[in-house]
Image: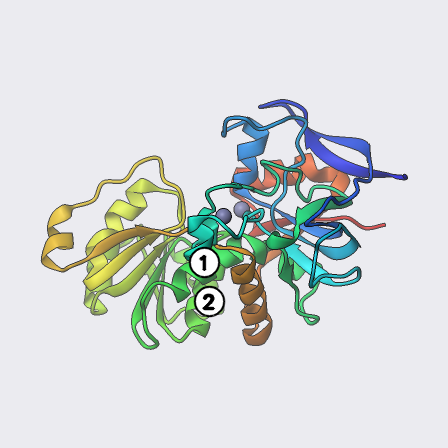
Amino acid sequence: MPNMRVVQVARPKGPLELAEREIPEPNAGQVRIKVHACGVCHSDSVTKEGLLPNIAYPRVPGHEVIGTIDAVGPAVPGWRPGQRVGVGWHGGNCGYCDACRGGDAFACETETLVTGVTHDGGYAEYMIAPATALARVPDDLSAVEAAPLMCAGITTFNALRNSGARPGETVAVLGIGGLGHLGVQFAVKMGFRTVAIARGEDKAPLARKLGAHHYIDSAAEDPAAALQKLGGARVILATAASGAAMNAVQGGLGIRGTLLIVGVPDSLNINPLPLIFGSRSVQGWYSGTSIDSQQTLAFSALTGVRSMNEFYPLARAPEAYDRMMSGRARFRVVLTMGE
Ligand SMILES: [Zn+2]
Ligand SMILES: [Zn+2]
């Protein structure tokens, strides 16, 4: 079998390193994907830094994968070589546990598979994926356009569409970075009155370009008061990984409003009185499963939602990772495999 190039982490906190491996064969229930592009996500630090127990090293990170099925293992109905597919954080599910049968496959109890964490991911020319992790990719989305939608996209899209907000209601997006610049676009295309919140007047043109109807500069004014002036938010999608920023906006929720958390702050202070007296809530949202990814891609192709990306070839993955971790990328970083 010929070899492939991968970028792996040999030990927790070790460097990302280019390596050669044999191209693997898919087992039952799995396919092999020829990877075309893979997004670089902050959650890749889970593998790089060893933030979860029992990660087996060396491990190939990467959970924003777009490619083409290249080989199909036994017992994989419905998929064939040549189909374009995506794989996200959700690395597959069993289909028979109580959570799966209850429609909560994201919380599968028997196989907590995470792409690039429990098995090798997309910083590679080829990867193996369970068929339950596959999303179909529309023809009119390129691999590099689609890759960041497999994590940053699905997370914001799926949170917003399940938020309970209805068209015309006010939805605020806190932060307009990697997650938030997609969240604003999705909120606009879903028909919400969309408010972007970030620090600095210099972000106002970006917010407008993304389609936001209002922009709140939280460095210049109290974002909670500004939201209340707009009538209060039905939903605040918190994408910025800042507890202080989340604390500052919670007072902007309208009656029955929800602070919907997808960014990961170190800690969070919630004032319980407005929750009680306004029946408000604080909720987290898991990104989603393969069908949610597929619907994210389809919606993005249909409505023109696109990630803004910086590109690096696979061999420069360490540089790409550092760029993403610096927080200065505008806005997602994508590895391309090339030939
Ligand atoms: Zn991610
Ligand atoms: Zn299950």
Q: In the shown orientation, is residue 128 left or right of residue 297?
A: right
Residue 288, image x, y percentages? 48, 55
**Does residue 48 sit above or below 250 in this rendering?**
above
Q: Amino acid at mark 2?
A: Phe
Q: In the shown orientation, is residue 271 left or right of residue 34?
A: left
Q: Mark 1 vs ligand 1: CB under 8 Å?
A: no
Residue 304, image x, y percentages? 57, 72
Element type where label 1 sits in the image: helix
**Residue located farthest toward the right when viewing the structure as drawn:** 2
Please count the marks in the image.
2
Question: Measuring 76% from the left and 61% from the top, which residue is drawn there?
Answer: 80
Q: Amino acid at mark 1?
A: Thr
Identify the residue position indicated by label 2 in the image. 186
**Does residue 12 sit above or below 209 in this rendering?**
above
Q: In the shown orientation, is residue 261 left or right of residue 30?
A: left
Identify the residue position indicated by label 1 in the image. 156
Work out which quarter of the rendered image holds the N terminus and state it: top right
Cβ atoms at labels 2 and 1 below 8 Å apart: yes
Q: Residue 329 or 292: which is nearer the viewer?
A: 292
